Image (spheres, rainbow, N blue to C red):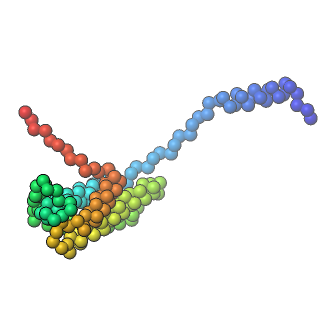
Amino acid sequence: MPIGRRSLFLSGGALFVAACARVTPQSAPPTPAPPPDLEPWNQEAQGILSDVLNTLRTFDDFQAFRVSTDNGSSMHLPSELSWDAPTSAAWDEATHVTRGLHGRADQLFTAVTTARINPDLWRLQRTLADATHNLLDLSDALSAYRDRVDVLPPGDASSALRLLDAAWAQWAAAAGRWGVSRAEAIGCASA
């Protein structure tokens, strides 16, 4: 059966009108509310990262002290002033944080991975678990440095510097996942 010009023209016009018709978008399903534990998890992770940041700064002070007091060190500059050693309170706190970090991070990891949340939020839970696992890796890096420090011979401690750099890199990776930075707020004195 042959198609006439008129039929072809009408069917083409109908297709054109159908193609130009307004399509009503389908509304997206409502986004489920985040789990109630989300804010406490964020606070705990940020607290861990803050404690580790102070610990890493104490370890930096230790490294600088060891280099500045060893005149034979290749890292010691002739015009460099001597650094003070970290205070015993700062060193004890850094050791305490290092030794307790794995337990804190593991507790948070367990809380995140075993929480019963809305099944629609499984991606969020997986992302949080992955970010929390970075804290466990940070614990391992910090412990490796602290364990090396325990057996350092006298000198500039340069043999532990690679481990300290690795701990800083791991902190940066973990902090980025939790929205934490090394920046400090500087208060202004009122005039």
Residue 100 makes an appearance in the image: no
Judge left or right: residue 1 versus residue 187.
right
- Can you say whether 170 is above or below 186 in the image? below
Does 133 sit above or below residue 121? below
In the image, 108: left or right of 16? left
Q: Residue at x 45, y 57 (%)?
A: 122
User: Can residue 14 be seen at all in this image of the molecule?
Assistant: yes
Q: Nearer the viewer, residue 183 or 62?
A: 62
Q: Residue furthest left?
A: 191
Rendered location of residue 112, percent (x, y) = 36, 61
- Residue 50 in the image: x percent, y percent? 23, 56
Question: Residue 42 appears in which quarter of the rendering?
Answer: bottom left
| Quadrant in which the C terminus appears | top left
Residue shown at the point (80%, 26%) measured from the top left: 10
Q: Can you give x and y, in whole percent of width and height, for residue 48 in the image? A: 25, 59
Residue drawn at (84%, 24%), measured in percent from left and top? Answer: 6
Locate the N terminus and report the quarter of the image it occupies: top right
Whether 140 is drawn above or below 56: the answer is below
Which of the 4 image quarters holds residue 78?
A: bottom left
